[in-house]
Amino acid sequence: MKKGLFITFEGADGCGKTTQSKLIQQYLEENGHETLWTREPGSIGLGQRIRELLLFYDGDVSPRCEAFLFLADRSQNIEHVIKPAVEQGKIVICDRHTDSTIAYQGYGRGEDIIQLKYLNELATGGMKPDLTIVFDVSTEIAQLRVGNEKDRMESAGIEFHKKVRQGYLEIAKQEPDRIKVVNADNSIEEVFEDTKKLLDNIINQ
Ligand code: TMP
């Protein structure tokens, strides 16, 4: 059976990855590829309920509880959405995945990164992205893009978001073959050109 590809888009809030992921999906479809776009948290069904809780619940949420909710959503998404589509030969584009947990709950909230890696592995059953693109944006530009209407995670403060950004850069250093960093301070068009090159490279490998 033809095997597809699993690509994840990552970065701090306001980095523009959702816009880029949609543009890339359109580009791939126009070039004859079958694709599937998904996101974490909140792809389908139960995941959407978990997303509501994670982003809009207004009581106390412990960092560990937060981590487990993201992981619960991930295990559903891998099993019901990502794995079947990759097995059908599709190019799956996932807006956030395991590296978000390391960057946000690990570097951002201070949960133990080794334990989070283990839990990620449990949630995904060991399935890993073929390519991850981190959209790196300066925290000041990102905050302007997010604007004033913030969800629970976006409201976590500038120091938290600086740690998340540094976290992503650290993760990218540790896995240079899988993770590529794109400068997302640039215009949508420039970022799209850089992203397209990374996609073309992996498809033509
Ligand atoms: P987004 O869909 O707008 O990117 O929002 C999802 C938010 O959830 C964003 O602030 C990042 C955060 N997040 C985590 O903290 N950990 C995770 O594992 C994931 C997938 C997302």
Image (spheres, helix red, strand yellow):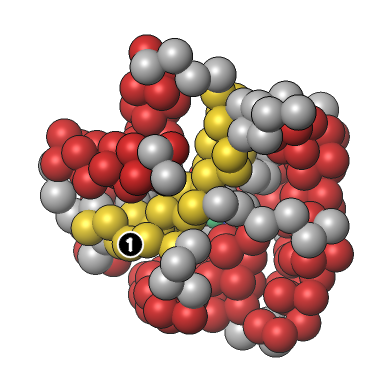
Q: Secondary structure at mark 1?
A: strand
Left/right placement of residue 48 relative to residue 172 reads right
How many tags in the picture? 1
Within 10 angstroms of label 1, few (less than 14), some, or many (20 or more) residues?
many
In this rendering, is residue 89 above or below 132? above
Left/right placement of residue 33 relative to residue 39 reads left
Q: Residue at x 72, y 25 (%)?
A: 88
Q: The disc labelled 1 sits on which kind of residue?
A: Val
Q: Residue at x 75, y 50 (%)?
A: 74
In this rendering, is residue 164 above or below 55? below
Where the C terminus falls, by quadrant?
top left
In this rendering, is residue 107 above or below 143? below
Q: Could you say which is closer to the camera, residue 182 or residue 45?
A: 182
Q: Can residue 41 be seen here?
A: yes
Q: Residue at x 76, y 38 (%)?
A: 83
Q: Which residue is mark 1?
A: 181
Q: Residue at x 47, y 48 (%)?
A: 9
Left/right placement of residue 57 relative to residue 25 reads right
Query: Residue 35's spot in the image, x, y percent?
Result: 55, 23
Q: Could you say which is closer to the camera, residue 154 or residue 196?
A: 196
Q: Can residue 123 be seen here?
A: no
Query: Residue 138's spot in the image, x, y percent?
Result: 24, 65
Where the N terminus falls, by quadrant?
top right
Q: Could you say which is closer to the camera, residue 56 or residue 92?
A: 92
Q: Could you say which is closer to the camera, residue 141 or residue 40?
A: 40
